[in-house]
Image: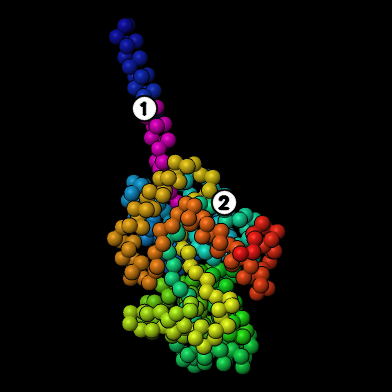
Amino acid sequence: MKKRSLLVLLLALILVSSVFAQGQREDVYPSRDITDIVVWGAGGGTDVCNRVVMAEMAEELGVNINVVNKTGGVSGSIGMLDAFGKPHDGYYLCGLSESNVTAAVMGGWDNRMDVWDVFIIGGSPDIISVTPGTPYQTIEDLVEAAKAQPGMIKAGASGAGSIHHLNLLGFEKGAGVELNFIPYDGSKPAQNAAMSGEIDLVITSVAEQAQLIKGGKLRPLAVLVPDDFDLDGNTLPTAFASYPGLGDYLPHSQAIGFAVAADAPDQVKQTLYGAFDKAMESDAVKEFGKKNYYILSGARGAEANAIFKQLEANFAYTLKDLGANKVDPATLGISRP
């Protein structure tokens, strides 16, 4: 009888120890897989950058990071709303970019960007390219035709309020033209539309277009930054040389990355900081940046949050000055920079 009682007691102790150990394991972040909800389409710059960096972070964290796409809405608002609606425990990240900072002033998001703690992977300058079958050989050809046919030339970019849309608006103002803007759920579908002739021109980044340009599937006309850009020995001219008025509206810089809810536990954020730092220093990420024409950043925490706060203000008031905003940024507490 005594042996039986001792056996029961031993089994009970083993059970309690097992439950206690399990609880300890679950308290250590991460103890299960993480989901990264990317707000732009598969194959675009934000998607590809997230997949490369998340693969390296997963190695460091010892869990899988599942990257999924949730597109649509205004300035990627559907994906942001979905990610922000998940538990703020670090198991849900939001793959985003500088284009998301306009979601509030475009009426698709009720929050400021300060609800996120941001990690910046990097960015690439925007470029105007056309369907090879069009008659436009230079940026001057395009502008001359656009002035002769106001609102007739179809121009594609990712959704309304994205950096590519903002650059399109700035190009219209600075060059004195009116284009027919066609929004898409991401850079890849916009580029596909340009290659098929569904639209006449597309504005996305050099990184996103590089292989298509080298393969002759898109014809580059000009970059929307003040200096020429070298693409493997081929000079992509700046549109600013022919249209200095662009300087009043451009350039806008890319800042591709991801975010975790700002009110996630500090231990969670510190763990993510460490994994992100290791990922950005990895050979895989450095080689990816070099091969794909990205200027890598690695900013995170207070530094990255300050950059996004500045981008939010710059983009919000640029849209207001262009007459393209839906909500007055001042009512959102965004001060003019």
**Amino acid at dot 2:** Val
The answer to whether residue 164 is magenta is no
Residue 158, how many percent across, how many down?
53, 71
> Which residues make up the magenta segment?
20-35
In the rendered image, the vertical position of residue 250 relative to residue 103, given as above or below:
below
Label 1: which residue? Answer: 18
Label 1 crowding class (10 Å Cα cut-off): few <14, some 14-19, many 20+? few
Distance between the Cα atoms at labels 2 and 1? Answer: 38 Å
Residue 151, how many percent across, how many down?
63, 85
- On residue 115, which mark appears? 2
In the rendered image, the vertical position of residue 313 relative to residue 236, given as above or below:
above
Q: Residue at x 52, y 74 (%)?
A: 251
In the rendered image, the vertical position of residue 207 relative to residue 40, given as above or below:
below
First-in-chain label (2 vs 1): 1
* Quadrant into which the N terminus falls: top left
The answer to whether residue 22 is magenta is yes
- Confirm whether residue 270 shows in the render: yes
- Confirm whether residue 68 shows in the render: no
Residue 316, how many percent across, how many down?
62, 65
Total marks placed: 2
**Amino acid at dot 1:** Ser
Residue 43, how many percent across, how many down?
43, 68
Q: Residue at x 69, y 61 (%)?
A: 330
Residue in front for this viewpoint, 272 or 152? 272
Residue in front for this viewpoint, 202 or 195? 202
Residue occupying the far top of the picture: 1
Q: Residue at x 61, y 85 (%)?
A: 176
* Quadrant into which the C terminus falls: bottom right
Label 2 crowding class (10 Å Cα cut-off): few <14, some 14-19, many 20+? some
